[in-house]
Image: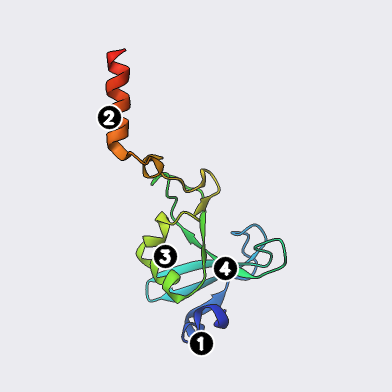
Amino acid sequence: MRRYFGPEVLPMWRWRDGSQLAGGDRVAEIRLGADRIVLALRTDVDGAGDVGFDVLVGCPADDECEGQAWAPVYNVTDLLRALTGELMNDPDVRCIVHGPHENDGQEDDPEGPAGLEAQYAEAARG
């Protein structure tokens, strides 16, 4: 934990022993007054035994979703992004119900919205 987030976070860090929130991976939380950040220690993030952390965030696909969404965090800046809600839009967020966060495809369209308007016009002309 100290290597990823620095020694300043240590006084706010607590392991949640016995938690099954992360599918058997160890769970911790960082408390900041009334706020808290829940993290999972992942012990095999790349299939080669490397260690990393995921943070629990809201589902990026559906505000009403009650599933868990996890995003990788690498440093204290990522923790701040999780606390402020910015990390929810990260492409690496994975909801256990909806799967990975995906955009609506418009960002990948080189013609952008204009290309969609042209497709609509062509379809309307028949």
Q: Residues within 10 Å of mark 4 (few under 14, many from 20)?
A: many
In terms of depth relative to the viewer, which is nearer, 42 or 126? 126
In terms of depth relative to the viewer, which is nearer, 13 or 86? 86
What element does badge 3 sit on? helix
In terms of depth relative to the viewer, which is nearer, 33 or 122? 122
Q: Are marks 3 and 1 in contact (CB under 8 Å)?
A: no
Mark 1 sits on what residue? 7
For the question of whether residue 125 can be seen, the reply is yes
> Spatial distance from mark 2 to mark 3, Cα to Cα?
36 Å
> Spatial distance from mark 4 to mark 2, Cα to Cα?
42 Å
Q: Are marks 3 and 4 in contact (CB under 8 Å)?
A: no
Task: Say which amino acid is labelled 2.
Answer: Glu
As drawn, is 67 to the left or to the right of 111?
Answer: right
> Residue 59: percent from the left, percent from the top?
45, 50
> Spatial distance from mark 2 to mark 1, Cα to Cα?
53 Å
Image quadrant where residue 88 sits:
bottom left
Decide which of tag 2 and tag 3 comes sooner along the chain.
Answer: 3
> Spatial distance from mark 3 to mark 1, Cα to Cα?
19 Å
Decide which of tag 2 and tag 1 comes sooner along the chain.
Answer: 1
What element does badge 2 sit on? helix
Mark 2 sits on what residue? 117
Decide which of tag 3 and tag 1 comes sooner along the chain.
Answer: 1
Q: Nearer the viewer, mark 2 or mark 3?
A: 2
Task: Say which amino acid is labelled 1.
Answer: Pro
Image quadrant where residue 24 sits:
bottom right
> Spatial distance from mark 3 to mark 4, Cα to Cα?
12 Å
Which disc, if any, is residue 53? 4
Mark 3 sits on what residue? 82
